[in-house]
Image (spheres, grey):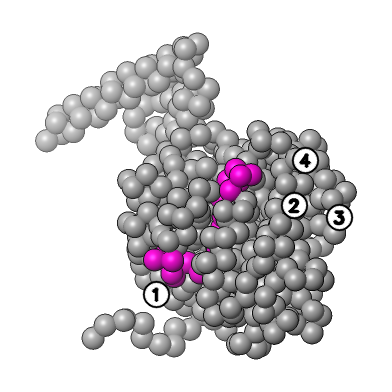
Amino acid sequence: MKNTLKQIITNHKNEEKAYSVARKAEIENPKTGDDRRNFLKKTALGGLGLSSLMGYSFEDNIAHTTSKINRSSAPSELKITDMRYVVTNVMGGTPIIKIETNQGIHGLGEVRDAADVRYALFLKSRILGRNPCNVEKIFKIIKQFGGPSRQAGGVCGVEMALWDLCGKAYNVPAWQLLGGRYRDKVRLYADTPEADSPEEQKRLIDFRVNDQGYTWLKMDVSIGELKGKKDTVVNGKFWKDKNGNLAQWGDQRNFMSYGNTMHPFTQIQITDKGLEELQRVVEDVRNMVGYDIPISTDHYGHFDLNNNIRMARALDKYRLAWFEDMVPWQYTEQWKTITDSIETPTTTGEDIYLLKDFKPLIHQRAVDIIHPDLASSGGLLETKRIADYAEEFGVAMAMHQAGTPVSFMANVHCAAATQNFLALEHHSVDLPWWEGLVKTVGGFKMIDKGFATVPLTAPGLGIELNEEVLKKHIHPKDKSYFKSTKEWDELRSHDRTYS
């Protein structure tokens, strides 16, 4: 027995020595790529240098390396210990959440633009004590508490933070955990708001295209452009708010306001004169931009599919990239009718939660492009599943995003890992402090000439909060800054959905 043990130790010594020599040779080989070389250096036992390994016995190596193990890199022992938040001034109050662990590393997530942070806090008691690297398992536990649009903000915010944590624990980028990447940079489309004059519109466009290098734009083609123009809209006066606007976002307290009434139920129509006015608006922008740059459109107003078809046909000649959310996403058959009736591509999906509600649109090819918002669709993995499913039916994916750099980078990782991806929305082009809310790990440039940089080595989402800037842009409705949330620790209900 003693000789057998001695022989095992001797064999280990020889194997370790041979492995060390081979590893050192690979590191010193000029043909070895930088990423591979860095990987080999970092993953030497316990981080021990190879030159040191050569002088130790096997027993000494084990004793030395185990004494230097960093326990914060033991993913199997990770446990969630807390969830905290800050409400930023982005999009009227967008919360960033921080999920903390017993090993001192944390993950960042975001509750979709201007949704209530309690959508996330409600989930805290359901994830405490769990290993954050079991992302899919935790997602299946909490996904029943998500719903369409911002109702999914909590579930998706938690899912983002889990991937950030998991990537940090294993020291790999989130895209690697999703199966690898298709691209090193992600094309962005810049939202361009409506302007009071052609001159102001041109200034906004020039800033995006010439100063910042964006290669894809989006604009609103709203019946708001027809305000005060006689005989352009039928039945509009009945739905106007106290300021004389057909306000799509409406009065949240009035369930029957224009903004809260689904499109088929307003009986608003656009006249031929109104269509001519909208043609002029689009033609002005197309002339400013030219035809090399795609122009997507959105926010038309709440009117039915017949008027959407009339409007789309009037604008088809401008070769727009897509018509977005012309009718609510729930109306699959209406979407199919519109898509079959016009030439311009159609898209919807920013308010759809989970793959199951994308399937009818994809199966019937009711839209040409799906358009999930990762902060509503289920997070990184579910959005990749949605994209992969659409790819099987020949349907492309663009991505809606209107939040902080946290959800932005979550989208970048998902887009990098998805083949049928077109472009990702950047909604905060005009906020000079927006990028400064975070610091990139390793110092990579988050946005460069209209493209987002895919972090090739930075772990997790590849960012950390820039507290100095963040503290200057906290929303006034909640000035707390990652304070204790112990009141959300206790589980108060039984969540099983079946008997």
Who comes first in sequence, dot 2 or dot 1?
Answer: 1
Q: Nearer the viewer, mark 2 or mark 1?
A: 2
Which numbered mark, 2 or 4, is in the foreground of this view?
2
Q: Dots 4 and 1: beta carbons under 8 Å?
A: no
Q: Position of residue 367 (x, y in %)?
A: 44, 55
Q: Which residue is mark 3?
A: 197
Residue 283 coordinates in the image, percent (x, y): 72, 46
The residue tagged 2 is 280
The x, y position of residue 265, in whole percent, is: 54, 80
Residue ID for mark 4: 288
Q: How many other residues sit within 10 Å of disc 4, few (<14), some (14-19) or many (≥20)?
A: some
Residue linked to disc 1: 144
Which range is magenta? 316-334
Residue 344 shown in magenta: no
Which-is-in-front pick, marks 1 and 3? 3
Residue 488 seen: yes
